[in-house]
Amino acid sequence: MFGLKVLSAVLPIAILELTVSAACSGDAWDVIIVGSGPAGIVVADRMSEAGKKTLILEQGGPSYFATGGRARPDWLNGTELSRVDVPGLYKSIFSNSDGNLTCPPEWLNSFQGCTVGGSTAINAGLFFQPPASDWDRYFPDGWKNADMQRAIQKVREKQTSTDNPSQDGKRYLQSGYEAAKQWLVDGAGFKEVGLNDGPQNHTKSKVFGHPVFNYEGGQRSGPVKTYLQSALARENFSFMTGARVLRVSREVDTAIGVEVENSDGGVNATTEHCVTDGGRIIVSAGAILSPQVLMWSGIGDAEILTNISSLGLIKTPSQDWINNTAVGDKVFDNPNTFIELYSDSIASYNYSYSDSRPEDRDLYLQSRSGPYSFASETSAFWDIIQQDEDLVGVQGTIDSSGFQDYFEDGTITLNVYGTSGLRSFGRVGLDAKGIALPTSNFYADKRDAQAVATFIHNIFAALPSTLKPLNIAQNSTVDDLTTWVSTYSPYTMGNVQHWSSSCRLESCVDVDAKVIGMKNLFVVDASISAPLTTNPAMGTMIIAERAVERILALDA
C-alpha cells in the first residue's frame, strides 16, 4: 500500500526512499519499536533520548501535512494543512477515506489509525487524565498513583493541551454547554471544574466541564507534533513508514529482529531489521494488532498458534512456541449509548468536510478560530457508580448535533460510555486468514448494564423541563434502561474504538512490560492497560512514559 520511507528530519519532515537488502537491513539497532501511535512515539523519543540507537516502524503512511499528508478538502488548498491538522474535520474520518488513514481489512478487522500518529491522527483529540483511582485499583505494584506521578508530569509538560482551542479566545457552540450545565451542575449536583485540574490525586467523580483537547494553535497536536519532533532531531533515531511488521524473529527466548513486509512500486518484499546483542524490540502496534504480532511470532494460545501455523504464518519452530492464553485475552472497548436531547434554546451545529459554512471556513483559515478549531464535543462529565465493593466509571460526552434519525435544529447527542470497573471483556482472535479480529462481549455481565443504566437514571432525574430526551423515555426505570442499553440498536451497544487491555500486566507481560517467557521483547501500548475511566490517549502516553522508566531501569 505504501512504499518504504524513512523520516529523518525535524519539521517539515523529509521523506526519503530507503534502499534495503536481504538478511539484516543496514546496521543493527538498540531498540526497534513497532508502531507510531501514542505509545510508540513516546517510547521512541525517550529511548533515543537515553542514547539508544532507535528505529520506529510504521505500516501506514503520512497524516499531518508536516509528515507529507496531503489529503484534504478543496477549501484547504494553498495551505500547509491536511485533513488531519484541522480538528473540525475529525468526524469525516467515519465517512471519507481520503488519505488511507485507517487500517485496511487485509491488515486488521477493526477500526484503527494506520498512519503516522496512529489513532491520535484520526480521533477527536480528547485528552483527559485518568483518575488516581484507576492506577490504585486496577494496576499492579509499581504502577500505583504514587508511582505514576513522574510519568504524569512528563506527559503534561511535553504534550500541549487546551480546553479553549479557538485562537481568538472565544468559546463557540456554547448553547449545548449551557443547557448541559443547567441540567448537570445546577440540577444534578455535578461540579464544574477544569477537567485535568489536580494532577497529583486526580478525580473524575461527579465532575463536569469543557473538554480538554491535545491541540495547539487551533490545530491538532498530539505526539507527532511534540515527542516525535524531539526524536527526529537526534542522529540516533530513524522512522520508517510503509513498513508492516509481520512478526518478531527470535531464537528461543531472545528476539533478534523483526520481519517487515514492504510494498514499493507494487512489488511486495520482506526485510529483516535486527537488534544488537542486548537490544530490545518493543511492540506498540495497538491493542488489536499487538496480539497478532505476538501470535505470528509463536506467542499465544496454543490452539490459535496451531491453526495459523498451518497457514505458514509462524516461522518459529513449534518446540519454541510460548503458549500463553493471556495474549489477546480480556480485550476491552467502551460500550457506547447515544441519547438524543432537544431544547429550543440549543443551536445545533453540523460539521462538513467539503461544504463548510463560508464564514466558519474563513474564520478558521484566517485566524485558526471558530468551530473548526475543535472537534464536535462541547462538554464532558463523569460519575462513579458503586456496586457493592466495586466501582464503575461512566463518562458522558455531549456533541454539537443530533445523530441517526434526529437532526432537527435544537438536537444534541449525549454519548454515555461505560469505562473502568466493567467486568465484560472480549478477546482478540484471528480470522481464517490469520488477521486480528476482536470481540466486544458488551454487557456479558449484567451488572455492567445496570451500572450504565443507573448513571442514566440518576441524571435523568434532574432533567429540566426545557431539555427532553427523544429516543428513550425520561421516566424509564433502572430496569427499563438496563434492558435498553443492553439490547442492540443504532443507539446502543456501539463500539467507541477505544480498545485496550489485550496483553495485560502480570499475565501477558510482566510488570516491566516484558513479554512473559522472553528476555528482550516488550509490549507498550493500550494492550497492557486496564480499562481506564477516560478516553485512552493521555493514559496510554502516561503508561508509555512509565514503561520506559522501568525498561531503562533494567540496564542497571
Image: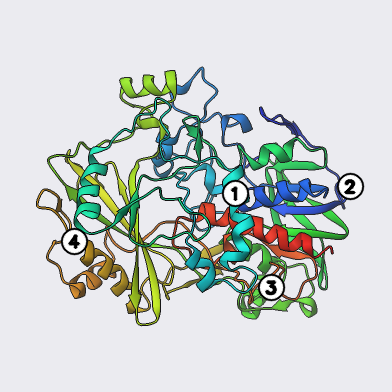
- Give, as a three-letter code, the residue at label 2: Asp
Q: Which residue is mark 4?
A: 460
Disc 1 element: helix
Pick whichever of labels 2 and 3 is earlier in the sequence: 2
Q: Nearer the viewer, residue 499 or 235?
A: 235
Q: Residues within 10 Å of mark 2 (few under 14, many from 20)?
A: few
Count residues near mark 3 (Cα–Cα under 10 Å), then give few for <14, some for 14-19, many for 20+: some
Are the residues at dot 4 and dot 2 in contact (C-beta closer than 8 Å)?
A: no
Q: Nearer the viewer, mark 2 or mark 3?
A: 3
- What is the CA distance from the residue labelled 3 to the residue labelled 4? 43 Å
Quadrant of the image occupied by residue 487: bottom left
Residue 180 appears at what percent x and percent y? Answer: 24, 48
Q: Residue at x 61, y 30 (%)?
A: 66
Task: Indicate the quadrant containing the C terminus: top left, top right, bottom left or bottom right.
Answer: bottom right
Q: Which residue is mark 3?
A: 510
Q: CA distance from mark 3 to mark 1?
A: 23 Å
- Asked if one can make out residue 455 in the rendered structure from this viewpoint, the answer is yes
Q: Earlier in the sequence, mark 3 or mark 4?
A: 4
> Is 77 above or below relative to 47?
above
Q: Which residue is mark 1?
A: 155
Type of amino acid at the residue the image marks with label 4: Phe
Which residue, as the protein is rendered here, is positioned at the far bottom?
Answer: 388
Q: Residue at x 26, y 69 (%)?
A: 453
Q: Earlier in the sequence, mark 1 or mark 2?
A: 2
